[in-house]
Image: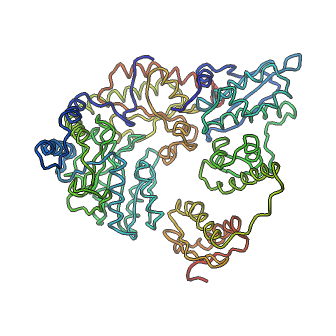
Amino acid sequence: MSRLVYLDNNATTCVAPEVRDAMLPFLTDLWGNPSSMHAFGGRVMRHVEEAREKVAALIHADPSEIIFTSCGTESNNAAIYGVAEILGPQARLITSRVEHPAVLGPCRHFREHGHTVIELPVDGVGQVDLAALREALFGGHGLVSLMWANNETGTIFPIDEIAALVKSVGGVFHTDAVQAVGKVPLDVSRTPVDLLSLSGHKLHAPKGIGALYVRRGTRLKTYMIGGHQENGRRGGTENVPYIVGLGKAAELAAASLAGEAAHVAPLRDRLEAGLLATCPDARINGDTRHRLPNTLNISFEFIEGEAILYHLSDLGICASSGSACSSGSLEPSHVIRAMGVPFTAVHGSIRFSLSRYTTAADIDTVLDHVPRVVAKLRALSPFVTT
Amino acid sequence: MWDYTDKVLDHFRNPRNVGKIEHPDGVGTVGALACGDALTLMFKLGPDGRIAEVKFQTFGCASAIASSSVLTEMVIGKTVEEAGTITNKQIAEALGGLPDQKMHCSVMGREALEAAIHNYRTGETAMRHLDERIVCTCFGVSENEILRITRENGLSSVDEVTNFCKAGGGCGLCRNEIQKLVDGVVAERTQTKTAPAEAPRKLTNLQKIKLIEEIITREIRPALQRDHGDVELVDISGDRVTIAFRGMCAGCHASETTRHSLIEAKLRECVSPDITVVEEGKS
């Protein structure tokens, strides 16, 4: 296979070399339990707390407001379960149709148990309907869970406005910021979110580590009951190497945030312009005015996403698709469908997601190959008439 | 990634017989853009009456393209009668097998071939008779097609049917109906093997309660929840089922229609024709 061009960073990212180096001592010499009453274990605790400070700093939180979890899905489950259980079955759960399954799943679980769950619609670019949110909040407050940025399209919700709206009626606001953290600046000291989920492997830490920000004073039922770890809010011996890795990744992300906009966004924009210019019947999915700097979701009409991905994979290019076949189900992406993308384009949606390691040469390779793949599949398609 | 055989990948990467034929003897088109795959297959007969040329165009995933491509190779040189006996199983076997969830690609190949042969014999372009009953409205799959696929491939579950023809893979509302069709075919199978099956047993009270609960949870509540409504099962006494509307259904002016046309009709169909559904406090 030719050189790997990895443009699937919203799925997962490479572990940064600095992160790996920071973790290694905790897989070799420093393997003690941070809770132990001996210096060998105890000195590990300092590193856990340093990591907590770095994660907190990335989103401008207080370290005491950070709970380490095993992944973004756990953080989302912990937030929704933890709040819904406290508020009781009268509380409404308000979310959107384009959330990640790790939010929609728990919400629908609570619907089975008597909660009223409202899934807000989105418009053609994937923006949430704020009028519908206002209406839903008017009918009774509860927990609102809306993502900071969408994993498939990169569309960024107006979180400042949403948070202010929810807090003005006394609701609890959780945001799944798994895709936003490390890509755009987040500041919980200015944005009144109560809970925020993040995931390590989306920002160059390894898989298996995440965090939940819980604003001080937010009532949350403990979902993983066990020892006193994480101040009793999440039992289980600390995953020290990965916590240290997440800390390092957060530190690196904070340092590269400005570069993200200056380096990644222009590469993404060049990719977008190039593909639109060279591929017939291509259209962008998502809100190009409010979008993550690294994400491009583009539909190639009349051809199918899985076929595109397999050809790209043969060429060493990694991307992803919202087509039914590539998801393993028969229905195409719930996000693309919720946006009302015409069915001629639904199955041919491809997501390219860049990172700070993406190079200009990577983009050149994609711009070189994709038009040929598209042409090859269009020649096969019964729906292409020209 | 899917566990595709080398044969599938070869036919996907280098599809055979792509394109169109001018003045073909038979053309068949199945599938649609909205469904995620579609295939147009056409053939021309040689002077010896055998299929001399086949061309295809496919909109679909790697295995849909590979299934179409391998089918063209299987058809060339055959008489129309011989080609008409090709089954979806044979298409899948020619590819060294397909992942379970991709078996519908082989069915699409067989369907397009049949449509092309039908077109050659009758000049008609549509295969489906208007009076055929559609079971899966998401993917437009008829009762006859489900029965046939279940019989031909020895299927015994709804999930298998979904893998083979997509039926039941959309909104899921027809899954109960597919289950009944599958049960029927499975019964045929055991019947032909053994003595005639005994008449269906009457449900015990406990079985009936469980079935009602299951239908409300699996079929009725998801339908109401899509409109932000909901329903709760309050009591079952004999054939009398008491429910309470929740969410947007509570106080909805159409809830009487929902009670009668959706809930009662569904329970009468699936459980017993004697069922009556009443709303709590409204008997």
- Foreground pick, B111 / A125: B111
Tell me: A358 left or right of A40: right
For residue A362, what is the image quadrant? Answer: top left
- Foreground pick, B28 / B6: B6
Q: Position of residue B277 (x, y in %)?
A: 64, 75
Compared with A328, A79 (above or below) is: below
Q: What colouring method underlies this structural image?
A: rainbow
Residue at x 55% of width, y 40% of height: A324
Tell me: B8 left or right of A234: right
For residue A135, what is the image quadrant? Answer: bottom left
Tell me: B30 left or right of A82: right
Image quarter of the C terminus of chain B: bottom right
Q: Position of residue A130 (x, y in %)?
A: 38, 56
Q: Give the farthest residue toward the right.
A: B48
Residue at x 54% of width, y 37% of height: A345
Compared with B29, B12 (above or below) is: above
Compared with B276, B82 (above or below) is: above
For residue A379, what is the image quadrant? Answer: top right
Q: Give the farthest residue toward the left.
A: A39
Q: Number of marks in the image?
A: 0
Residue at x 38% of width, y 40% of height: A154
- Foreground pick, A261 / B165: B165
Q: Position of residue A229 (x, y in %)?
A: 22, 53
Tell me: B210 left or right of A295: right
Q: Position of residue B120 (x, y in %)?
A: 84, 30
